[in-house]
Amino acid sequence: MMTASSDSLISIIIASFNCELYLRQSLESVLSQSEPRLTVIVVDDGSTDATVRIVKQIANEDERVRLVQIEHTGFPGVVRNRGIEHVRTPFVAFLDADDFYHPERVERAIHVLQANSQLTAVFHDHVRFWENEDVADQEPFLGGTKFVERAGKYLDAVGEGLYVCKPSFYSFMSLEQIPMHTSAVTVRLEAFQVAGGFSEALRYNQDEDLWLRLALQGQFAYLDEPLSYFRLRPDSHTGHFRVGVDTSKSESVLQCNVELYIGNYLRGAAQMSPADQKACRSLVATRCMDLAYYYAVAGATREERRALMKAWAWRRSWTVLAMLAKSLVPTKLRAALRNLRRGVPYAG
């Protein structure tokens, strides 16, 4: 039996809900890390499958594993924050119960933070894969998006495959890409606590919200290696990204996107140049217009207009004005006009 160590360096928070099929792989990927001085805190969000039994069984075999049970919330930020309440280590990292780590993931991240005391957090590349795909065949996600090339002027190369993000990297995150995946971030516990932890109000985007707040607070480093693996599946919390899966989630996702970018602007505008402020306001308006389009397709005219009025408040443009004018056209007439464009005869 592996026993818990009083000199643990890092706590891994594993959020779980009905993940009995994947939980063992997830836990084993953490417990077999090349850096063994760790604590695993599994926070179960009211699972109804065998999740709790599996965790208890593994905890009996390895004292580094702890189980925290809460009533079901469906809010990942709440689940992870409950886990953080039990952390007593200087560093903390995260993993969902259907994802897993590279064997050296923890060691590599801790080494960067220990060698660079000015850093708030470190993140690395990751691999995304569907269940029926071979992980080995997949391209690293950030490598595929040419992240290093696109963010080059915001990064300082300090070693082979290691970059320190400049203070201006916050603007890149606000306007271009939030490159952190939850399983790929390791944070100093103190910085996490000062930032206020994950938002418990956002059902989606609560992780991006935290990374933006941490970027305002201090520096990130980036390890250009895929050290974690993100499983894509339609029944997961992030399954809404797959077209055609539970469109009721789409509204919540779009609403959370609007809240994410408005909150970020209100917090960080003072750190941006006037040009970046303008671009960020335009981005907020675009997110509002995305939500308005969803409502237009759904036939929710009142909600569509509200979203467009919010877009107008953030960006006075002819595009928003045209969409507002279009929203005043009766729903049946709009549908008839769409059909005419598609060559469908008007049915009256």
Image (cartoon, grey):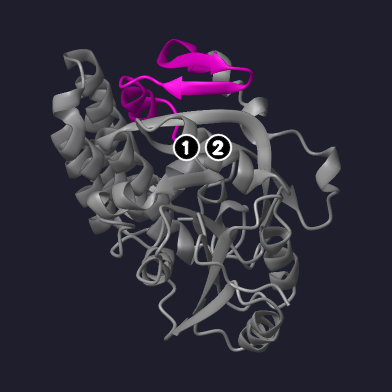
In 3D space, how far apart are the residues under numbered discs 2 and 1 (Cα atoms)?
5 Å
Between 160 and 255, the one nearer to me in the picture: 160
Specify the label residue 98 is tagged with. none
Q: Which residues are magenta?
A: 150-178
Would residue 342 be visible to someone looking at this image? Answer: no
Identify the image quadrant of the N terminus.
bottom right
Give x and y (percent) for residue 332. Answer: 38, 55
Answer above or below: position of 165 versus 334. Answer: above
In percent of width and height, residue 22 lies at 72, 69
Query: For the residue labelled by badge 2, is the local secondary structure a helix, a strand or a loop?
Result: helix
Secondary structure state at the residue bearing disc 1: helix
At label 2, the amino acid type is His
Query: Is residue 227 positioned above or below 155 on the image?
Result: below
Which residue is tagged 1? 114
* Amino acid of disc 1: Gln
Residue at x 49%, y 39% (from the top left corner): 180
Q: Is residue 160 magenta?
A: yes
Asked whether, in this view, residue 82 is left or right of residue 33, the answer is left
Residue drawn at (75%, 53%), measured in percent from left and top? 130
Task: Find residue 221 and report its horizontal and vertical position in percent.
Answer: 47, 29
Residue bearing the label numbered 2? 111
Judge left or right: residue 298 versus residue 280: right
Please state, as top left, top right, bottom left or bottom right, where the C terminus lies in the image: bottom left
Residue 44 in view here: yes
Residue 81 on image: x %, y %: 36, 66
- In the figure, residue 272 lies in which quadrant? top left
Contact between labelled residues 1 and 2, with CB atoms less than 8 Å apart? yes
Front residue of 165/298: it is 165
